[in-house]
Image (cartoon, coloured by chain):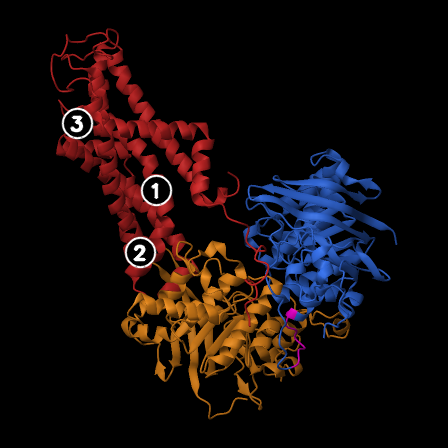
């Protein structure tokens, strides 16, 4: 349960990231791609917040903004009480020690020319956490055990591991500096079905055993996000359209986009499938370069009225920790 | 307990067993005749250069060991040149010049070119535009012409030939390095390193450079061949190695006036150039095939 | 209804430098007219190679070693891969849709050109008639503004639209059987739902049989009438979708069902991952390939060779000595 007294580790306030589109020799700005357009959410200590949406909705961009891989156009990112959007590059080092990332592709997230042990030790060496090689080595062994890898494999190279094992190495690297926040960017979508559950369970077990570890879990698969997260934020074209506790999402979805997204995901059970409502959306996600006026979902929305084109619906609280951005609900 | 995959049946792994790079290297080098022959010639040339004083039957600079333009004989296997110097000995010493110019030039050009390429590719933005536009401008001139002009300005001699050729080759390395850096930079492990708080220098040396080394190695080998050819061309045109230094290009040039009377004078260094260039190209070819991940499994 | 395509004891092997890979090892399946079946399995289980074998599109070092592919009482494997008759069947009678719509289209030719090519080649259309038919086809698969977009190039289409073009291409010669190999894996969930709805509607209207090859159990539950579960190059369980999901008898099928998160999961459900890794298919032991990962294995599994498929109830076949009795949930 999430109460007001719990400690907020990350606060994102009205975050915007606009990529300028330039033209010609003089790089004249002709338009903005509003990749993230006014996103606000909190992440509480020990919590997992799921960020879900289709490609181009800005979920990955938000993750990269929080890690300051991208410099946000405006808005605040308050991590551990400090606004990190204006932190200088030097001071950022300290913040980065407390944040980590897990990528989608376990093949490209490790340097193929370094051994697994070196990969896991890298963040600790960058932050000079220990004084001797033996200390680093002991910590790497400890991390290997934590993620369920045999410490005898420390000397092996990435290509000698399977996809699932590689993702465990990446998890170990993310845990190395004892971070408060791990941004998981589609951490399982490149893995085989039977391996995905291993990584999901690993992430959940780690969170239970490590005090104060929070996840921002970014994925396109709503059933996975719902399973892993305490709360889920659904995104569409750079904005959050609905945010609620994950078990309420399937039982009581309010936003029409959330409803169609849920409907689009089949449940592996033919008996349940027979009874589900089917909402097939028309058309495709519009380009963020030229988003529709008003509510950006209205051209595809089965509940839209002409008024929906007139203004952007605010994300309003409907009670019970449930917020939705729609005029019609 | 999460880990069970290492306990019982370790025979099952998802990734197919990898063939080690050494094994592939060996197979490519021994399996393809042209590459094997090239490698053999390369080793031969290297040994010749290394042990030139032991191998050469005469002093290559000594004038008048026999009559000028002597025909091949037991004493002088390839005859002698216009000054009566032993052709075989000069040929053997010429390999030193060729390789010296080749290796030193490639090293200088690679170090400077790779550094520029890394800076441009990794930083992007203004450094990229600045460096790459200058490189593009230099590349407008054919490499040999550029080297020729520089050598003509600086004057001949081993040192100036090396400077001229190095300068002409820097753009190639910068270009290739920059392109590879741009693609390696997009890998998640580079981003991860940046997000861990690593400095730019650390990221470049740790993560980018090792992953572009192999293609660079192939390029270096291939270019050794063309460098030897370029040096020979400069020497042939008379703005390369100055007499009495032994250089294959100069020997071809000296000999071709007597082509009818004593064809071996031009022919022997010509063949030496051809074989050496061929050898380096073949070895480079073999290296490329052995190291190319796209050909993995096919060779 | 009669069987339109029947595959018997198909064996396809790849002779690689690391050893002999039995990608498909004695596969049998059939599909009736107008039926929708699904071949389910993880990556590397041989499902894609099976499809390519049926089409005789296996490239060296792959080789079809034995088996029969009976299509309308003709054994397709008796034709050479490049026979004119085989080419006439491929594309016209049996069509295929691939996962990656990017690489399946030639980037330098217009969509209209590529679609009409098949019609001119297989159905002897004139150029004008072909173009008219192409516009019809594009409207059929829901490409808006078809009249103008015939002259567009592939890069001007989104991923979903490209896959629609592929569906149009596959359906252009009214095939009897359509094989869709992971047709929507690269696409967003709402696009995936659109396309599968489109495909299943179209095959019904055109009286085509459809084989959906996928790793996604949800899609199977929603669309397929019958399924074949593949593991390490063989079918390990087959039957009607409802029967398999209600009474999975093979421990692998059961494991697959239990390791995926579902949208309608109760709060706090723990996923049960399948231990270990998928096999690598090189130098496989003669015993059941799933045995090393199986939590229900008994002495007989270690001793005896891979069991043959056995009918446990009408139309429900399973290849297992132990045969689990548990429900998926």
Name the side, left or right, on which A269 lies relative to B42.
right
Q: Are marks 1 and 2 on the same chain?
A: yes
Q: Is residue C260 magenta?
A: yes
Question: Mark 1 — residue?
Answer: B217
Q: CA distance from mark 1 to mark 3?
A: 27 Å
Viewer-nearest of labels 1 and 3? 1
Mark 3, Cα crowd under 10 Å, few <14 / some 14-19 / many 20+, is many
Q: Secondary structure at mark 3?
A: loop
Read off the chain for label 2: B
**Disc on res. B154:** none
Kindly identify the residue that appears in the image at 72 percent across and 59 percent down.
C301
Q: CA distance from mark 2 to mark 3?
A: 37 Å
Q: Quadrant of residue C130?
A: top right
Region of the chain picked out in magenta, as a range = C259-266
Q: CA distance from mark 1 to mark 2?
A: 16 Å
Please provide percent x and percent y for residue B215: 38, 44
Kindly identify the residue that appears in the image at 46 percent across and 93 percent down.
A5
Classify C270 as above or below B19.
below
Please name the color used to draw chain C: blue
State if disc 3 and disc 2 touch (CB < 8 Å): no
Please name the color used to draw chain A: orange
């Amino acid at each position: 349960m999430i109460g007001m007294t719990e400690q907020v580790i990350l606060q994102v306030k009205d975050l915007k990231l606009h990529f300028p589109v330039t033209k010609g020799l003089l790089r004249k700005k002709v338009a903005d791609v509003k990749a993230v357009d006014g996103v606000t959410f909190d992440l509480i200590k020990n919590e997992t917040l799921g960020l879900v949406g289709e490609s181009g909705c800005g979920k990955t961009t938000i993750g990269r903004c929080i890690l300051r891989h991208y410099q946000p156009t405006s808005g605040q990112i308050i991590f551990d009480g400090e606004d990190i959007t204006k932190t200088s590059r030097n001071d950022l080092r300290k913040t980065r020690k407390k944040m980590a990332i897990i990528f989608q592709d376990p093949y490209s997230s490790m340097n193929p020319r370094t051994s697994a042990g070196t990969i896991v030790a890298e963040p600790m060496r960058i932050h000079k956490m220990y004084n001797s090689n033996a200390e680093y080595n002991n910590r790497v062994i400890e991390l290997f055990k934590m993620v369920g890898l045999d410490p005898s494999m420390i000397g092996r190279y990435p290509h000698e591991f399977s996809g699932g094992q590689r993702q465990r190495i990446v998890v170990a690297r993310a845990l190395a500096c004892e971070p408060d926040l791990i941004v998981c960017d589609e951490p399982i979508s490149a893995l085989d079905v039977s391996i995905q559950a291993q990584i999901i369970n690993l992430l959940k077990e780690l969170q239970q055993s490590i005090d104060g570890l929070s996840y921002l879990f970014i994925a396109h698969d709503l059933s996975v996000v719902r399973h892993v997260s305490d709360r889920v934020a659904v995104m569409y074209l750079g904005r959050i359209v609905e945010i609620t506790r994950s078990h309420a999402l399937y039982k009581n979805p309010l936003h029409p986009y959330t409803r169609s997204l849920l409907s689009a995901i089949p449940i592996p059970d033919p008996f349940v499938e027979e009874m589900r409502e089917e909402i097939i959306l028309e058309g495709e996600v519009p380009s963020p370069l030229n988003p529709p006026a008003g509510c950006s979902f209205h051209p595809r929305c089965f509940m839209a009225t002409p008024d929906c084109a007139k203004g952007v619906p605010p994300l309003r609280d409907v009670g019970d920790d449930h917020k939705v951005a729609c005029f019609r609900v | 307990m999460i880990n069970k995959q290492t306990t019982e049946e370790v025979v099952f792994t998802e990734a197919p067993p990898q063939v080690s790079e050494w094994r592939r290297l060996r197979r490519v080098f021994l399996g393809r005749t042209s590459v094997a022959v090239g490698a053999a010639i390369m080793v031969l040339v290297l040994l010749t250069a290394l042990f030139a004083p032991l191998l050469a039957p005469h002093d290559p600079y000594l004038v008048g060991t026999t009559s000028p333009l002597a025909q091949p004989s037991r004493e002088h296997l390839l005859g002698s040149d216009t000054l009566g110097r032993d052709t075989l000995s000069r040929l053997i010493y010429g390999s030193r010049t060729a390789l010296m110019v080749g290796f030193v030039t490639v090293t200088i050009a690679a170090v400077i070119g790779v550094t520029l390429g890394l800076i441009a590719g990794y930083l992007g933005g203004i450094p990229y535009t600045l460096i790459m536009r200058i490189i593009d401008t230099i590349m407008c001139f054919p490499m040999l012409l550029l080297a020729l002009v520089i050598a003509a300005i600086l004057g001949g001699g081993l040192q100036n030939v090396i400077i001229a050729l190095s300068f002409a080759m820097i753009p190639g390395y910068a270009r290739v390095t920059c392109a590879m850096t741009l693609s390696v930079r997009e890998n998640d492990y580079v981003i991860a390193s940046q997000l861990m708080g690593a400095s730019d220098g650390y990221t470049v040396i740790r993560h980018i450079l090792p992953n572009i080394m192999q293609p660079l190695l192939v390029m270096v080998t291939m270019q050794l061949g063309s460098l030897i050819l370029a040096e020979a061309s400069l020497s042939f045109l008379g703005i390369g190695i100055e007499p009495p230094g032994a250089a294959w290009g100069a020997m071809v040039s000296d000999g071709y006036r007597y082509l009818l009377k004593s064809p071996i004078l031009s022919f022997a260094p010509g063949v030496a150039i051809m074989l050496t260039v061929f050898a380096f190209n073949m070895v480079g070819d073999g290296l490329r095939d052995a190291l190319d991940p796209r050909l993995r499994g096919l060779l | 209804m009669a069987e339109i395509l029947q595959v018997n004891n198909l064996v396809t092997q790849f002779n690689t430098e690391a050893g002999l890979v039995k990608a498909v090892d004695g596969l049998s399946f059939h599909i009736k007219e107008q039926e929708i079946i699904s071949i389910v399995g993880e990556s590397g289980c041989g499902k894609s190679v099976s499809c390519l074998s049926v089409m005789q599109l296996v490239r060296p070092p792959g080789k079809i070693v034995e088996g029969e592919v009976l299509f309308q009482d003709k054994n397709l494997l008796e034709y050479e891969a490049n026979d004119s008759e085989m080419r006439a069947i491929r594309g016209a009678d049996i069509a295929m849709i691939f996962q990656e719509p990017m690489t399946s289209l030639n980037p330098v030719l217009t969509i209209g050109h590529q679609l009409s090519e098949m019609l001119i080649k297989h159905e002897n259309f004139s150029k004008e008639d072909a173009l008219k038919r192409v516009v019809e086809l594009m409207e059929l698969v829901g490409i808006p503004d078809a009249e103008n977009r015939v002259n567009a190039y592939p890069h001007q289409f989104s991923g979903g639209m490209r896959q629609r073009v592929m569906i149009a291409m596959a359906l252009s010669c009214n095939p009897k059987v359509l094989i869709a190999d992971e047709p929507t894996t690269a696409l967003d969930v709402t696009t995936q739902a659109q396309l599968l709805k489109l495909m299943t509607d179209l095959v019904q209207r055109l009286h085509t049989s459809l084989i959906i090859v996928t790793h996604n159990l949800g899609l199977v539950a929603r669309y397929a009438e019958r399924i074949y579960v593949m593991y390490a190059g063989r079918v390990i369980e087959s039957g009607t979708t409802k029967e398999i999901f209600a009474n999975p008898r093979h421990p692998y099928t059961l494991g697959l069902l239990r390791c995926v998160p579902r949208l309608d999961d109760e709060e706090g459900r723990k996923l049960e991952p399948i231990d270990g890794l998928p096999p690598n298919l090189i130098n496989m032991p003669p015993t059941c390939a799933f045995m090393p990962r199986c939590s229900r294995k008994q002495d007989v599994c270690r001793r005896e060779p891979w069991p043959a498929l056995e009918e446990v109830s009408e139309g429900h076949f399973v290849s297992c000595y132990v045969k689990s009795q548990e429900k998926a949930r």
